[in-house]
Image (cartoon, helix red, strand yellow):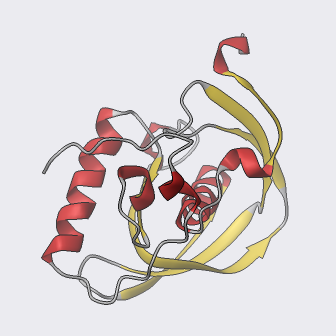
């Protein structure tokens, strides 16, 4: 495993749509391992491949840092939202936009189909932090940043 550099807002790669993964191979599994290490090192909840400079539809999520959730860790290859219900506005932040936070309205519950590191299809349903993270990371794969959806954005230092 290796730490990867987090790509920051302003880099054109964050605005491009990621390409589908045609085959889950050792290169993709290494990418997943590196993304886990990078996510942990940066104390994040989710990380999409474009955030480490790779235009592939790959993301990792770890909600274990949230006191309200049971701590779900999931790897997503070629994820797509197949159902979305309700609405929830919550604050979001992003490793690619350090120091900023914004109020974003997302679905309250989502169902996502994806492939795992073994190449097997699966479905995951989530609400709360997991739904927000799934939507946030899939947006990254489509070249969309949370600031594009935010009703307001402000520096994190304003939090008290």
In this rendering, the answer to whether 107 lies above or below 63 is below
In this rendering, the answer to whether 127 lies above or below 146 is below
Residue 29 location (% of width, % of height): 20, 69
- Residue 72 can be seen in this image: no
The C terminus lies in which quarter of the figure?
Answer: top right
Residue 156 location (% of width, % of height): 65, 20
**Left or right of 19: which side holds 153?**
right
Give the camera-side residue of 113 and 14: 14
* Residue lying at 72% horizontally and 66% vertically, measured from the top left: 109
Give the camera-side residue of 80 and 146: 146
- Residue 35 can be seen in this image: yes
**Left or right of 153: which side holds 74?**
left
**Left or right of 56: which side holds 139?**
right
Residue 50, located in which quarter of the rendered image?
Answer: bottom left
Residue 21, located in which quarter of the rendered image?
Answer: bottom left
**Left or right of 80: which side holds 23?**
left
Give the camera-side residue of 11 and 56: 11
The mark total stands at 0
In this rendering, the answer to whether 43 lies above or below 146 is above
Residue 148 location (% of width, % of height): 75, 50
* Residue lying at 35% horizontally and 43% vertically, measured from the top left: 39
């Amino acid at each position: 495993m290796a730490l990867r550099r987090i790509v920051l807002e302003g880099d054109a790669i964050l605005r491009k749509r990621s390409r589908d993964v045609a085959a889950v191979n050792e290169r993709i599994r290494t990418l997943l391992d590196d993304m886990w290490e990078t996510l942990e090192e940066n104390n994040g909840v989710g990380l999409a491949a474009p955030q480490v400079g790779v235009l592939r539809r790959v993301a990792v999520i770890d909600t274990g840092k949230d006191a309200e959730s049971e701590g779900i860790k999931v790897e997503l290859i070629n994820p797509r939202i197949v159902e979305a219900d309700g609405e929830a506005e919550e604050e979001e932040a992003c490793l690619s936009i350090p120091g900023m936070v914004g109020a974003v309205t997302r679905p309250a519950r989502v169902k996502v189909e994806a492939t795992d590191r073994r190449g097997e299809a699966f479905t995951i349903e989530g609400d709360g932090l997991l739904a927000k993270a799934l939507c946030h990371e899939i947006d990254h794969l489509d070249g969309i940043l949370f600031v594009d959806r935010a009703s307001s954005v402000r520096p994190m230092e304003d939090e008290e």
